[in-house]
Image: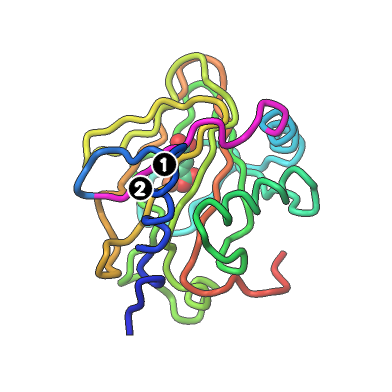
Amino acid sequence: MTSILATGEATKARLESRPDVQKVPTPKLDLFRMRAFASDEECAALIDMIERRRRPSTLSDDTSGDAAFRTSETCDMDEADPVVARINLRFCEILGIDAALGEPLQGQRYLVGQEFKAHTDYFDPRGMDLKSTRSVMGQRTWTAMVYLNTPEAGGATRFKAIGKTIQPVAGMMLAWNNRRADGSVNPSTLHHAMKIRAGRKYVLTKWFCEHPWPSGRG
Ligand SMILES: O=C(O)CCC(=O)C(=O)O
Ligand SMILES: [Fe+2]
């Protein structure tokens, strides 16, 4: 049975009910933004952690064959840190999704010229390896991310299929449903983290999955 909860409609209703959350107008996709999701102090602490723990970004579903597809650096956030733990809980509370369904928080840093070309956060359903960790967690359901700074130039998140470009603003959260109401993956979630032209860009990303993330993870 496909329940309302399983397709993310409950999260959509929850976000729609909040006066501090705006829906980006499009019939093709559930996309929301919320200003002042994180404070300046929280953003500064998170940026500091990204600087200390970053490593080159990888692709979890690499079908592009393009080495320049994702040129940023990634940080596996330390969830024992109080700021990280607080922000993690805030994502779960605002979206109304059980923390057990969340992947570990990731930070990203982009320098001038770096980007993450157009992609979807869900996995190609045809390519899902049944023996992988991914098959245990299932498909990605919702994505939530927060911009940790306001880049000097560039670095917008462009949703090509709906013709919307979101300009990063420090502390602002973006959240979208990777699936449609019938539970199928939504290709209109295609998005491109565009090149930084001046300054830097830092974001924090939270992905939710269908099934709990396995315990004992690294
Ligand atoms: O940095 C952005 O604007 C988007 C990041 C993103 O799409 C991702 O990390 O999956
Ligand atoms: Fe993405």
Q: CA distance from mark 2 to mark 1?
A: 9 Å
Image coordinates of residue 126 in percent, x first then y, are: 30, 72
Instruction: Identify the mark at residue 69; answer none if there is no mark.
Output: 1
Q: Residue furthest bottom?
A: 1
Image coordinates of residue 61 in percent, x first then y, are: 43, 59
Image coordinates of residue 147 in percent, x first then y, are: 54, 33
Q: Amino acid at mark 2?
A: His
- Which sits in the foreground, 217 or 79? 79
Residue at x-position 71% and y-position 28%: 44
Q: Amino acid at mark 1?
A: Phe
- Give yes or no for contact between labels 2 and 1 (Cβ–Cβ under 8 Å): yes
- Looking at the figure, which quarter contains the C terminus? bottom right
- Which sits in the foreground, 165 or 8? 8
- Looking at the figure, which quarter contains the N terminus? bottom left
Q: Provide the residue span drawn in magenta.
A: 29-42
Residue 57 seen: yes
In the picture shown, does residue 29 fall above or below 2? above
In the picture shown, does residue 134 fall above or below 170? below
In the picture shown, does residue 102 fall above or below 158? below
Q: Is residue 39 magenta?
A: yes
Is 42 left, or right, of 15 in this rendering?
right
The 10 Å Cα crowd at callout 1, few under 14, some 14 to 19, many 20 or more, is some
Is 162 left, or right, of 212 in this rendering?
left
> Of label 2 and label 1, which has the lower sequence position?
1
Q: Is mark 2 within 8 Å of ligand 2?
A: yes
Q: Is residue 31 magenta?
A: yes
Instruction: Identify the mark at residue 119; answer none if there is no mark.
Output: 2
